[in-house]
């Protein structure tokens, strides 16, 4: 038996039941006749046909084969298959960004007159997309606190089609009960989508906990080094097919180059997520012990309200934490500006640690009242802990402490 490109089926069989860490390195591999070891990058927008009959057959779908990279691209497909395998899903469709994934999923599964219930502290652009664009086409939106399960039950209407949450939430690390929301959604025949960007399949498997669809911003931890934008929707073949049709027709497809970067990112995802989580936990404990710090929000801390729930649905607690300094906005800004190693940038999921003042950046578009309700106070700081040595990060954060 050949051990190169003839053995895709043999590999797929051998990977049945393999652990996620193995799937992250091996799943979705499709070698070309060059027998390359690392995945090939098909940086091409179109594909040539053997003859006109072949063109006709490929266009009609009578035979398999790529036509145009907005429809299919082998590198993008490798990425989709690998991520689907890691999430324990039948299928996945890759998109140009995380927002492209949310938009495509909503376009595919919602119609005018439908109603969505969304957790109130989702990513700001998700709120803008729903309120400014889907509302324009007659989709109704209600926002409910992630942790208020009775509030979710009360918000259900006869036209509710979709539950949408992010867990843990940004930046306060609130934890949504995926199992409970799944049970509620199933009772009412509502689709349930979880944005798994903060955890990735290395830490949390929403489908196994009862979700129907998973959203990813691959831009974050899947890349892991702050280079490329990308996203994905993951779920059953039945739920993904309509999303694929939106992406093919509407065009928010993933670039093959980005797919290649993300494929390589997945290979190290488990190691990275554990390292991000270990350092974040140590930093959260350290911050909790500083008298200049008013409160620390990290689900890994026993003091966090979502700690037990997070333990029951995540293997580690992730790399993002936030904290309130004792003082006002000026104090928070002084802290941030005193750090020298940690970058002042709004992205997260990077090997480089990042720090940001949510009230004046990521959450600045919310009204002051909405910010207050969401707990985004002026003295709150978010840190996305990277892969630098823990001691060096603590030395850098101490620079901030000394300004308080
Ligand atoms: C939880 C979450 N979902 C979705 C997105 C959107 O992803 P992208 O920036 O790749 O469009 C982000 C971006 O920060 C995010 O944090």
Image (cartoon, helix red, strand yellow):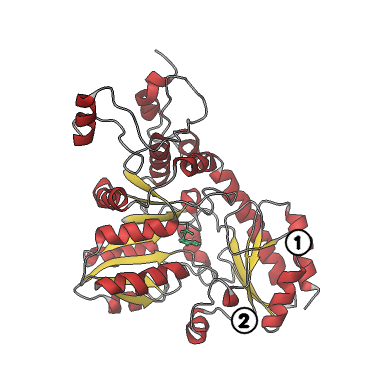
Q: Is residue 94 above or below residue 68?
A: below
Q: Is residue 289 visible?
A: no
The mark that comes first in sequence, 1 or 2, is 2
Q: Is residue 299 visible?
A: yes
Q: Quadrant of residue 145?
A: bottom left
Q: Quadrant of residue 172?
A: bottom right
Residue in the image at 45% along x and 37% along y: 23
Q: Secondary structure at mark 2?
A: loop
Q: Is residue 128 above or below residue 254?
A: below
Residue in the image at 70% along x and 84% along y: 327
* Location of residue 198 in the rendering, given as x and y in whole percent from the top left corner: 51, 58
Name the residue at the bottom extreme.
369
* Location of residue 267 in the rendering, given as x and y in whole percent from the top left corner: 53, 39
Residue receiving disc 2? 378
Residue receiving disc 1? 394
Name the residue at the top extreme.
1
Foreground pick, 215 / 72: 72
Does the residue tagged 1 have its C-beta within 8 Å of any atom of ligand 1? no
Q: Residues within 10 Å of mark 1 (few under 14, many from 20)?
A: some
């Amino acid at each position: 038996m050949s051990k190169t490109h003839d053995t895709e089926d043999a590999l797929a069989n051998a990977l049945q039941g393999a652990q996620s860490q193995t799937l992250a390195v091996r799943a979705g591999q499709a070698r070309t006749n060059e027998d390359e070891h690392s995945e090939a990058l098909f940086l091409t927008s179109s594909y040539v046909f053997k003859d006109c009959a072949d063109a006709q057959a490929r266009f009609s779908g009578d035979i398999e084969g790529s036509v145009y990279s907005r429809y299919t691209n082998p590198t993008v497909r490798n990425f989709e298959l690998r991520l689907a395998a890691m999430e324990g899903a039948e299928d996945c469709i890759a998109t140009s960004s995380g927002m492209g994934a949310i938009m495509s999923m909503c376009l595919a599964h919602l119609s005018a007159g439908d109603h969505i219930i969304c957790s109130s502290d989702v990513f700001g652009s998700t709120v803008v997309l729903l309120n400014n664009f889907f509302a324009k086409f007659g989709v109704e939106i209600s926002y409910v606190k992630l942790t208020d399960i009775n509030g979710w039950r009360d918000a259900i209407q006869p036209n509710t089609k979709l539950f949408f949450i992010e867990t843990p939430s940004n930046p306060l690390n609130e934890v949504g009960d995926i199992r409970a929301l799944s049970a509620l959604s199933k009772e009412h025949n509502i689709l349930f989508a979880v944005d798994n960007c903060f955890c990735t399949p290395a830490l949390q498997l929403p489908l196994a906990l009862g979700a129907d669809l998973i959203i990813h911003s691959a831009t974050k931890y899947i890349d892991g080094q702050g280079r490329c934008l990308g996203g994905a929707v993951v779920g059953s073949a039945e739920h993904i097919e309509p999303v694929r049709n939106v992406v093919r027709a509407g065009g928010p497809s993933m670039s093959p180059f980005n797919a290649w970067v993300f494929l390589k990112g997945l290979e190290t995802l488990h190691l990275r997520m554990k390292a991000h989580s270990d350092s974040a936990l140590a930093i959260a404990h350290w911050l909790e012990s500083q008298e200049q710090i008013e409160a620390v929000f990290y689900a890994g801390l026993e003091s966090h309200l979502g700690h037990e729930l997070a333990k029951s649905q995540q293997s580690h607690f992730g790399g993002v934490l936030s904290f309130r300094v004792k003082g006002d906005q000026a104090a928070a800004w002084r802290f941030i500006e005193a750090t020298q190693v940690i970058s002042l940038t709004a992205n997260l999921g990077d090997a480089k640690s990042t720090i940001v003042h949510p009230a004046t950046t990521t959450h600045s578009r919310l009204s002051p009242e909405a910010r207050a309700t969401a707990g985004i106070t002026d003295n709150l700081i978010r840190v996305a802990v990277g892969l630098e040595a823990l001691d060096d990060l603590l030395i850098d954060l101490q620079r901030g402490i000394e300004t308080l």
